[in-house]
Image (cartoon, coloured by chain):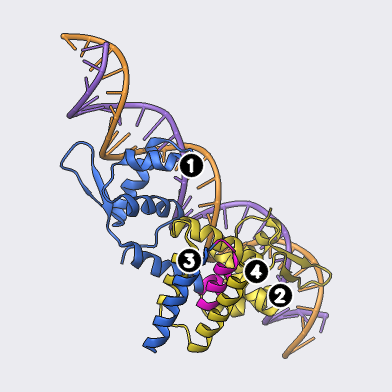
Chain colours: A yellow, B blue, C orange, D purple
Amino acid sequence: MTPKPTESELEILSIIWQKGKVTVRDVHEKLAEIKDTGYTTTLKTMQIMHVKGLLHRDEKNRTHVYFAAIGEKVTQKNLVENFVATAFGGSAKNLVMQALGQGNTSKEELDEIRAFLDQIENEK
Amino acid sequence: MTPKPTESELEILSIIWQKGKVTVRDVHEKLAEIKDTGYTTTLKTMQIMHVKGLLHRDEKNRTHVYFAAIGEKVTQKNLVENFVATAFGGSAKNLVMQALGQGNTSKEELDEIRAFLDQIENEK
DNA sequence: ATATTTGTACGAAATAAATCGTAGATAAAA
DNA sequence: TTTTATCTACGATTTATTTCGTACAAATAT
C-alpha cells in the first residue's frame, strides 16, 4: 500500500492532479505562488514521492516527466477516513456539518449537495 | 495563537474533549485501546501540549488534572479549513461529497444534514 | 517501618519531514 | 566554441514528532 502523503506531498499531488503530466519546474512554479522554498526542495520531494510510489515518472528525456501514481478520489477517501477518525470521533456527519458551517459554500453548491443527499438516500 | 495539534496530540485532545478533566492515566488507558505506547510517552506528550498551550492543568495535587485549553469546535474549524485547502483545492463541497460518499452515514444523520442545509440556505 | 506502586520531570534517542547546497551532465544561448 | 542556464543526484542539515528510560518524590500496601 502506498503510504499516506505528508502535507507537502499533498500540495504537490494537488497540483499534479490538476495538471496531469508535469516537470519539476511546472510544479515548482505553481508552488511558488503559495510557498517560498528552493527548486531543489521541490525536486527532492518529488524524487522521494517517486521512491515511495506516490508518483511515476518518465525518464526518457533529460527533463523527467512526473505523473500521479495514486488517484485523487482514492487518496481523498483515505484521508477523509483518517481525518474523521482522529478529529471527529468517527462521525462523518460532524465533519460535514463543520465544513458546511464555514459559510463559504455557494447556493449552487449547497443544491448540488442536496441532490447528492437525495441520491444516497434513495440507494438505501 | 495556539499551534495546530499534531496527529498524536489530536488523539489525546479527542479523549479530553469527551471526558472533560482528566489525569494522564485516564488518557493513557483510553489510548491503550488503540495504541500500544508507554505511560511516559503519554505523560510527555501531555506535558508538551501543556507547554504549547493546548492543555491547561491543575497542579494542586500530586496527580495533575488536565483539561483542554482550546475548544473542540474551534479546533475542528481550523483543521477543516486547512484540510479543505490542501486536499480539496479549497472546495468544501468536494470534501463534503467525499465524506458522504463513504457510505457510513445513517438515514437519520443524512436528514440532520439536510435540515442543516435548509437552515444555511435560509440565512443566505 | 519497609516495600511496592504511582506520579512527575527531564534528558535523550529514534524516526520522520522539510530544506538546501554542491557536483556534474546536458542543452541552449552568445 | 565558450559561457550560461537547466537538470538530476545525493549528501547533509535542520526542524518536528514520537517514544522511552531513569531519577526521585509521594502515596499506598504489607
Amino acid type at image mark 4:
Lys
State which mark lies toward you, 1 or 3: 3
Q: Is residue A46 left or right of residue A98?
A: right
Label pair 4/1, CB-CB below 8 angstroms? no
Q: Is residue B3 left or right of residue A111?
A: left
Total labels: the figure holds: 4
Secondary structure under the numbered disc 3 in the rendered image = helix
Query: x and y percent of residue B41 in the render?
Result: 40, 40
Which residue does the numbered mark 4 point to in the structure image? A73
Which residue does the numbered mark 1 point to in the structure image? B35
Residue in the foreground of this view, choosing between A43 and D16: D16
Figure check: C30 above or below A120: below
Residue B101: say if magenta: yes
Amino acid type at image mark 1:
Lys
> Pointer 2: residues within 10 angstroms few (<14), some, or many (20+)?
some
Please determine if labels 1 and 3 lie on a single subunit: yes
Residue A23's tag is 2
State which mark lies toward you, 2 or 1: 1
Amino acid type at image mark 3:
Glu
Identify the residue shown where x is 65% and y is 69%.
A73
Residue B108's tag is 3
Q: Which region of the structure is painted magenta?
A: B85-104
Please determine if labels 2 and 4 lie on a single subunit: yes
* Quarter holding residue B102: bottom right
Alpha carbons under labels 4 and 1: distance apart: 28 Å
Alpha carbons under labels 2 and 4: distance apart: 22 Å
Identify the residue shown where x is 34% and y is 52%.
B18
